[in-house]
Image: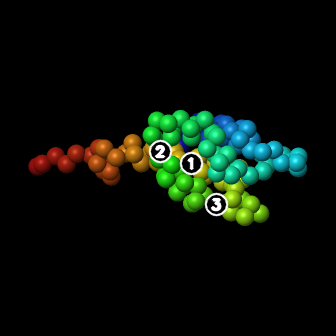
Amino acid sequence: GGLGEDEDEDREEMELEAVFSSLCVPSSSPSSGPSGVLTYPQILEWDEIRSMLSENLVSPEELRKIWDETGKAPGSEEKGIDVDGFLSFALAIDDLFYFEDLGGEGGEGGGVVDVPE
């Protein structure tokens, strides 16, 4: 992992924070970072989620499971996620595809072929 990877991660995080802010109902407190919480119906407004659902890349059940497993924001009565929760939600969705991509590769081993002696 060189320096480039960190920059990519930072940029991705900034993009996700922008998405979070656009989906979020703005909270009245002016703070440095994105604030407020997102509820499940608001998450479903995210274009990326909408297209995944419409292309059957992810099922509503899978989405709900990820949502349920995402840590909820303090004070949201388990109804919403803050920006950190949103980042981990987005990562969990990425992981879904990552594992599916690995599906046909025979899992472990990384392409090492046993050559018979």
Q: Position of residue 29 (x, y in %)?
A: 88, 50
Q: Quadrant of residue 98?
A: top left
Q: CA distance from mark 3 to mark 2?
A: 20 Å
Front residue (pair 102, 45): 45
Residue, disc 1: 91
Q: Residue 15: tell me if it is visible.
A: yes
Residue, disc 2: 58
Q: Position of residue 104 (x, y in %)?
A: 31, 44
Residue at 49% x, 53% y is 61
Total label count?
Answer: 3
Q: Earlier in the sequence, mark 1 or mark 2?
A: 2
Q: Earlier in the sequence, mark 1 or mark 3?
A: 3
Front residue (pair 17, 11): 17
Q: Secondary structure at mark 3?
A: loop
Residue type, numbered disc 2: Val
Mark 1 and mark 2 in contact? Answer it, CB < 8 Å: no
**Marking on residue 71:** 3
Residue at 39% x, 42% y is 101
